Image (cartoon, rainbow, N blue to C red):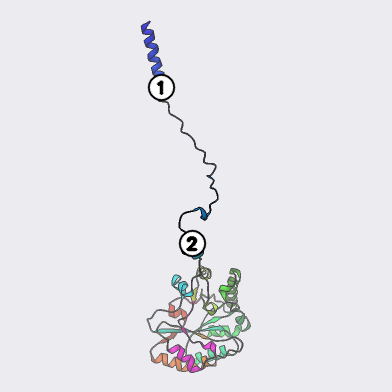
Amino acid sequence: MRIIRTTLLLSFLFMLVLGCSKPQTPEVKNFSKPHTLRPFSMNESVTPDLAGGKESHVRKPEPLTLAELRAKYSSTFLLHGPPAPKRIALTFDDVPDDYFTPLILDTLKQLHVKATFFVVGNRAESHPDIVRRMINEGHIIGNHSYSHANLPKIVDSAFRDEVLRTEDIIKKITGKTMLFIRPPYGNVSEDQIKWIASKHMKIINWNVDSLDWKGLSADQVKANIMSNISSGAIVLQHGAGGVGEDLTGTIEALPSMVAELRAQNIELVTIPELLHKPAYR
């Protein structure tokens, strides 16, 4: 009898040990419902306010300036070429017209100078023969938009149309696809720079401004250029203007200016020669 009680007691203890060692199922918490916060009022807080104002009020994003854009996109947005060898590039905007552009071409031909002309698409449509003359006489042409719009002021679709429409017109006239673009007024936005870079084009602005659009005399145009010239310079002039603009000073300044540059052993070249880049695709 004692043996039976002992056996039963051992069995009970064995079962008790098994029950205590059984793995416990972890409690599953319900994360389906987010913790609800009551509405907060700064009036309830004892934390000092921010003296300078809210971050969202102070740190309003501003578009980069042209100088900042040039620095950020220096491989696409160019103002000048390398300082050696001793070279500069003469460039002419807003072409062609049927008066000043032919006179400039005549003068450059007499001086044996090749230049770069930035062409407005709707003017190229009106004077395709002058565009062909530029090419035939060894000059380089670049894109200056279709209508000379202020590009950052227009929507993306209109901006792209300004560039692509001019590209198509020049392709039809010359068979060439331009690789250089100069935005009218030198103005361009960051998104536009990115799109131009995606087209494998270079933006060509300038670091020497003749200010000839002011209707200056030949001496004034020459002084503005020669007082700022250095090797690698890209010079801005105009080969056509708006209504009433007189570019006589630009044409008359060319012979003496070219003579003086050559006296300084500075070679006058086109943009692709200055930058060691192909002219067309």
For image coordinates 58% across by 89% down, the residue present is 245
Nearest to N terminus: mark 2 or mark 1:
1
Residues at discs 2 and 1 in contact (Cβ within 8 Å): no
Number of labelled discs? 2
Give the side of residue 209 with respect to residue 153, left or right.
left
Screen quadrant of the N terminus: top left
Q: Is residue 61 magenta?
A: no
Q: Which residues are magenta?
A: 204-227
Q: Residue 105: horizontal and vertical position, in percent?
A: 53, 89
Mark 2 and mark 1: Cα distance apart in space: 62 Å
247 w.r.t. 197: above or below: below
20 w.r.t. 57: above or below: above
Q: Residue 257: horizontal and vertical position, in percent?
A: 45, 92
Q: Residue 259: horizontal and vertical position, in percent?
A: 43, 93
Q: Which residue is mark 1?
A: 18
Q: Amino acid at mark 2?
A: Glu
Q: Amino acid at mark 1?
A: Leu
132 or 108: which is nearer to us? 108
**Does residue 202 appear in this view?**
yes
Q: Quadrant of residue 149?
A: bottom right
Give the side of residue 162 with respect to residue 201, left or right.
right
For image coordinates 42% across by 22% down, the residue present is 19
